[in-house]
Amino acid sequence: MSSISTQTEEREPGLLHRSLIERPQKVVSGSGIYLTLADGSRILDGCCGAAVSVIGHGNKQVQDAIMQQYLNVEYVHTMAYTTSSAEELADALTELSRPFGLTKAYFVCSGSEAMDAAMKLARQYHFENGQPQRRNFVARRQAYHGNTIGAMSVSSNLPRKIPYDGALTLDNVSFVSPAYAYRGQRDSETEEQYAARLVQELDDEFQQLGPETVVAFVAETVGGATAACITPPKGYFEGVRKVCDRYGILLVLDEVMCGSGRTGTYFAFEREGDVRPDLVTLGKGLGGGYAPIAGVLISEKVVNVLKRGTASFVHGHTYQAHPACCAAGLAVQQVIKREDLVAKCLSKGAFLESRLRSTLGGAKHVGEIRGRGLFLGIEFVQDRASKQPFKPAVKFASRMQEAAHSRGLAVYPGSGTVDGVNGDHVILAPPLTISEEELEEVVRLLKMAYDAVEEALV
Ligand code: PLP
């Protein structure tokens, strides 16, 4: 990912930024879909950072809820105490997830921690279920699950992994193909046949490892940061669920980026047929950027085994279920519900997708426009017919980010390496509160940015 080079102040900053060379832009305020920079210019937040600010910036109800929690009590330790904010947030989420068998919620401060917690819950489930030999995890190439040791180990975001791979990664993780139709589906195959082939590959991997040694299969329901909004082929997750069930392997779905309503259903897996995951992680949109909060939703099946065993989750964070973070998360969920943002996301997403297709769909370097709801990705290629990606040195996605930014639009760039193929992309994930007129503006600015990048290539 690139950052946007900016002010060249003389003084070396004390803060370790992502880049040791370039400094990010200083933001002084945010309101609705706009951020205001220190120089007074406004940026239309077309990506909510990384699909975070689900209800936009500066929401008064959320600010007030956080302040009220601080006035009541800022912190309690979860070993002995709880708060209404934490209990009510868990109740609000499990009200949505109970129909899918997920009956308890566990809160931490980041998506990576949520993924580590989910991996530990999965392992503890088997351990307490009399199957301590289960130690292997299977994940997918072109996945991103976070930066902590566990989450990084099941990820394949190479730039974030290479320096640590083999030294700070688990050795009990193997990878199968992503569900990436644009590059993976054969011309001779239907969508269903492609899904069946991927499921067979997973089954083969389980067989090869010895299915009785596998803890869980871990996947993003809709691929995000390294994949740019890849939706699975029809029947894929139903097939995955069946294969996991056949061997008693748990299914962990990572909805840190694609959950919380972003794809037009509260959980992205709701569009995948009759799929009941064992563990689901949420993050980003859960707190909407108002506070660092992420969570794991846990199935009754897992809860029951733990109940019969140690009756505890052997995993405690000082700041788990932090009162102010839970207050923020609860208020964000209330805004989503009251303003019917999940349903609106579906119709606005369809509008944005159709405007993107009509404006950029035929462009020379646009390989694919894809996604669901207000979670849309554009993959850029050197050559449309052969799908040949740009050489990494071209930095097409970074150029797009910079060109969009200089025109007043924030987009989320990335490149995902799959089997040696490096594809550039940008993600559009605006606040679910955005209007159609504002979406028109997103498309207009993005088209201007694209034209400038394309022109500069020749
Ligand atoms: N899972 C997915 C799908 C993500 O996109 C991310 C972050 O980008 C994470 C997990 C990690 O979340 P965090 O950055 O909050 O640790």
Image (cartoon, helix red, strand yellow):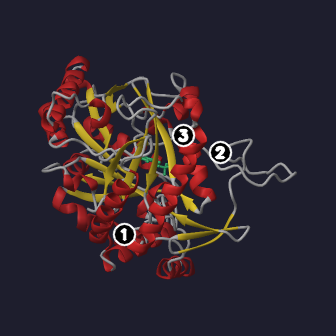
Could you tell me how far apart the alpha carbons at marks 1 and 2 are, in whole angstroms?
Answer: 32 Å
* Residue 172 in the image: above or below residue 123: above
Amino acid type at image mark 1? Leu
Q: Name the residue at 22% across, 20% down.
A: 210
Residue 435 visible somewhere in the drawing: no
Q: Secondary structure at mark 3?
A: helix
Is the residue marked 1 within 8 Å of ligand 1, measured from its CB? no
Q: Name the residue at 74% across, 42% down.
A: 21
Residue 59 visible somewhere in the drawing: yes
- Where residue 324 appears, as percent x and y from the top left, is 51, 70
- Where residue 266 appears, as percent x and y from the top left, is 28, 62
Amino acid type at image mark 2? Arg
Q: Could you say which is closer to the camera, residue 315 or residue 348? A: 348
Residue topped by disc 3:
396
Residue 117 badge: none
Residue sitting farthest toward the right: 10
Residue topped by disc 1:
89
Mark before the other along the chain sequence, 1 or 2:
2
Q: Secondary structure at mark 2?
A: loop
Residue topped by disc 2:
18
Could you tell me how far apart the alpha carbons at marks 1 and 3 are, in whole angstroms?
Answer: 41 Å
Amino acid type at image mark 3? Phe
Instruction: State left or right for residue 84 relative to residue 63.
Output: left
User: Comparing marks 2 and 3, which lies closer to the viewer?
Assistant: 3
* Quadrant of the frame with the N terminus: top right
Could you tell me how far apart the alpha carbons at marks 2 and 3 are, in whole angstroms?
Answer: 20 Å
- Where residue 328 appears, as percent x and y from the top left, is 47, 71
Q: Could you say which is closer to the camera, residue 229 or residue 80? A: 229
Q: Secondary structure at mark 1?
A: helix
Mark before the other along the chain sequence, 2 or 3:
2
Is the residue marked 3 within 8 Å of ligand 1, measured from its CB? no
Q: Residues within 10 Å of mark 2 (few under 14, many from 20)?
A: few
